[in-house]
Amino acid sequence: MHRVSGPLHVSVAYPRVLVLLSALASLVLLWKLGIRDLRLFLFYLPLGALIMTLMVRVAPFVLPPRLYVGKPPSFITKLDL
């Protein structure tokens, strides 16, 4: 087992993709269930939160995130701005 002396950070894109996938999955599920009324369609938010809860538990086993030791690299420093 390796020991890391600094904090580990996850890539910013990883949780953003999880949020988008869970929102899209909840919209698709509601559409498949036949809920097309705009007022009832707002149930995608709590359903998306439930799907996100499941995805956070399963996603690291399916596609592990990239971990950075210390401060993660920034696009601004890569572009020398």
Image (cartoon, rainbow, N blue to C red):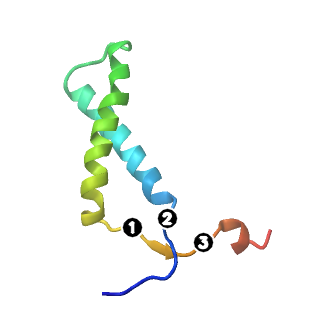
Q: Is mark 2 on a helix, strand or loop?
A: loop
Q: In which quarter of the image is the C terminus?
A: bottom right
The disc at residue 11 is 2
Sort mark 3 into few (<14), some (14-19) or many (20+) by Cα contacts within 10 Å: few
**Label 3: which residue?**
71
Q: Which amino acid does label 2 sit on?
A: Ser
**Left-right relation of 41 to 78:** left
Structural distance between the alpha carbons of marks 3 and 2? 11 Å
Residue ID for mark 1:
65
55 or 27, which lies in front?
A: 55
Which residue appears farthest toward the bottom when viewing the image? 2
> CB atoms at circles 2 and 1 under 8 Å apart?
yes
* Quadrant of residue 41 within the rendered picture: top left
Measure the alpha-carbon separation of dots 3 and 1: 16 Å
Q: Which residue is drawn at 24% across and 32% down?
A: 29
Residue for point 26% across, 27% down? 30
Which residue is outermost to the right?
81
Query: What x and y, as percent, mark residue 14?
Result: 44, 59
The image quarter containing residue 62 is bottom left
The x and y percentages for residue 48 are 33, 35
Numbered label tally = 3
**Residue 66 position within the rendered picture, expressed as x and y whole percent measured from the top left:** 43, 71
Q: In this view, does 81 lie above or below 57?
A: below
Q: In this view, does 33 lie to the left or right of 26?
A: left
Quadrant position of residue 36: top left
Q: Quadrant of the N terminus?
A: bottom left
Could you tell me residue 64's position as x and y percent?
Answer: 33, 68
